[in-house]
Image (cartoon, rainbow, N blue to C red):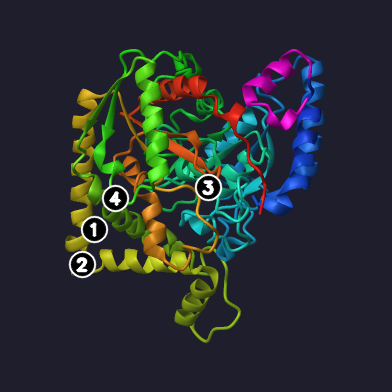
């Protein structure tokens, strides 16, 4: 039995039937990390010894009938911008290289309350700013499907670790596509929940009105299981919504007959790779075969989404990252002559080029004389984007688009061209602007064997619809049984 190839729901069954112990599962993942991490570079911090000890404890509890949940003893990976008490939370930045969090994020507490086992903290673009995980201070993560290509970003470490079967599932964060785009590049499932459904308490902020924590998993059922744990109101997060408790796995009927799917034509225009279009067209035909009603329409505001996103995101980043000055938080420069120089040197040394770029842009759009021209206007366009989506959801249940305009690109080909890198987010950012849920699932591979991602977008708090639509396609297409990463250079 190849333990690391199993989904979480399969692992749950084997634990319940006493076919496997938590120690056996955790040991298999630790061995997989030891074997593959040198090629993939998915982790900033590994907790292998601690994980094995925890697994033994949980097995002892299960023997006594004291296991806290059906998930007790299953490992998990956590993106390195989500706080974990007593463990480094670096945001893959020199600024927080030695920061050990004194508290857990709410989502971390929820995982621990289910007795999940933390295998470690996963690499990312510094402060979640990037689309390739090339902007990490520590290392570049490689895509298991082709080690010369990027895994996407900023949750590239999370997606690569799941694809490489070094963790059965992982947490990521999504500000403009940072769960969905790496999931597409790595051939796994990535779910960005509705803004406010999952607590952001303990997530190191990039852009507070856009950030959302979500799962990266091997299949749709695992995404629903993890969302069951993560979702819920949190009094520590003022943007967290009071919602009735749901079991998202109950939505996975696999029946889409009569489902109305809208295809925004703007997402299939110039800049979208032809092979990506072909795979999406094949997916659309699959939905038609399954009885869904598919119709093309125009989402007029889509072309403004990318510019709107980068103005809002950079403005909020400029504000949020102001606290990292070498005095309140973060790296402190050794050499300075006065307070002003201490600030300047600490921030110059602590932040990488992409973070600096976004802070400068954000500070500019918030500055006197430019606030109305840029930031205020972007917020007004944001309202128009929300309104356009409202109109679309008055007619359709789900919207279908590419997750990314291309498959994973080679390492180094875009890292020196910020504008080209920003275009990697063109299909995903509007979902964050409008606060909607979105899921990326693999829908095939291109001629070079690289995964293609399909994005399904739902109305606010209608995760059940996109989960079921994704599940129906997954059950029909069976991507995981057809394709596996090659780990070739």
Give the spatial CA distance, label 3 vs label 2: 32 Å
- Marks 4/1 in contact by CB < 8 Å: the verdict is no
Q: Please identify the dominant SS of the magenta region.
A: helix
Give the spatial CA distance, label 4 vs label 1: 27 Å
Residues in magenta?
1-19
Give the spatial CA distance, label 3 vs label 1: 27 Å
Residue 288, above or below 127? above
Image position, residue 486 (x, y; %):
66, 43
Mark seen at residue 375: 1
Quadrant where the image shows the N terminus: top right
Q: How packed is label 4: few (under 14 Cα within 10 Å), some, or many (20 or more)?
A: few
Of badges 4 and 3, nearer the viewer stands 4
Determine which residue is flagged by label 3: 155
Give the spatial CA distance, label 2 vs label 4: 31 Å
- The numbered mark, 3 or 1, whose residue comes first in the sequence reads 3
- The numbered mark, 2 or 4, whose residue comes first in the sequence reads 4
Image position, residue 128 (x, y; %):
48, 54
Determine which residue is flagged by label 4: 270
Mark 3: secondary structure: loop
Q: Is residue 320 magenta?
A: no
- Quarter of the image for residue 449 reads top right
Mark seen at residue 370: 2
Of badges 2 and 4, nearer the viewer stands 4
Asked if residue 486 can be seen in this view, the reply is: yes
């Amino acid at each position: 039995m190849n333990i690391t190839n199993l989904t979480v729901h399969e692992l749950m069954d084997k634990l319940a039937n006493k076919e496997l112990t938590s120690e056996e599962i955790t040991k298999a993942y630790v061995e997989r990390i030891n074997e593959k991490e040198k090629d993939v570079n998915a982790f900033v911090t590994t907790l292998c010894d601690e994980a094995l000890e925890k697994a033994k404890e949980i097995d002892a509890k299960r023997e006594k009938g004291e296991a806290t949940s059906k998930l007790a003893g299953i490992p998990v990976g956590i993106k390195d911008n989500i706080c974990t008490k007593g463990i480094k939370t670096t945001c893959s930045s020199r600024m927080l290289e030695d920061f050990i969090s004194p508290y857990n994020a709410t989502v971390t507490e929820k995982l621990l309350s289910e007795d999940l086992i933390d295998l470690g903290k996963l690499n990312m673009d510094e402060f979640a700013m990037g689309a390739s995980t090339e902007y990490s201070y520590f290392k570049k993560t490689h895509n298991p499907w082709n080690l010369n290509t990027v895994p996407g970003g900023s949750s590239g470490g999370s997606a690569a670790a799941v694809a490489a079967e070094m963790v059965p599932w992982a947490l990521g964060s999504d500000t403009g596509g940072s769960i969905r785009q790496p999931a597409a590049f790595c051939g796994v499932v990535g779910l960005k929940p509705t803004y406010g459904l999952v607590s952001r308490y303990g997530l190191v902020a990039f852009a507070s009105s856009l950030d959302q924590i979500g799962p990266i998993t091997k299949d749709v059922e695992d995404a629903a299981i993890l969302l069951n744990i993560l979702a819920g109101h949190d009094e520590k997060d003022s943007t967290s919504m009071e919602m009735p408790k749901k079991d998202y796995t109950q939505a996975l009927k696999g029946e889409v007959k009569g489902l109305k799917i809208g295809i925004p034509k703007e997402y299939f225009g110039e800049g979208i790779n032809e092979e990506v279009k072909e795979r999406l067209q094949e997916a659309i035909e699959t939905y038609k075969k399954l009885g869904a009603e598919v119709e093309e329409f125009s989402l007029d505001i889509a072309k403004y989404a990318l510019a709107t996103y980068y103005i809002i995101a950079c403005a909020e980043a400029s504000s949020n990252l102001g606290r990292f000055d070498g005095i309140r938080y973060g790296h402190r420069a050794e050499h300075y002559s006065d307070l002003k120089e201490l600030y300047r040197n600490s921030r110059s040394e602590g932040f990488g080029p992409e973070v600096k770029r976004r802070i400068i842009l954000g500070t500019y759009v918030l500055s006197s004389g430019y606030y109305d021209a840029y930031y205020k206007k972007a917020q007004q366009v944001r309202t128009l984007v929300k309104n356009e989506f409202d109109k679309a959801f008055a007619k359709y249940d789900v919207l279908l688009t590419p997750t990314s305009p291309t498959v994973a690109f080679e390492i180094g080909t875009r890292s020196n061209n910020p504008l080209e890198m920003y275009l990697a987010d063109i299909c995903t950012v509007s979902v964050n602007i409008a606060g909607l849920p979105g899921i990326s699932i693999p829908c095939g591979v291109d001629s070079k064997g690289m995964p293609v991602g399909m994005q399904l977008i739902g109305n606010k708090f209608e995760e059940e619809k996109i989960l079921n639509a994704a599940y129906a396609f997954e059950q029909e297409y069976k991507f995981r049984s057809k394709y596996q990463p090659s780990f070739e250079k």
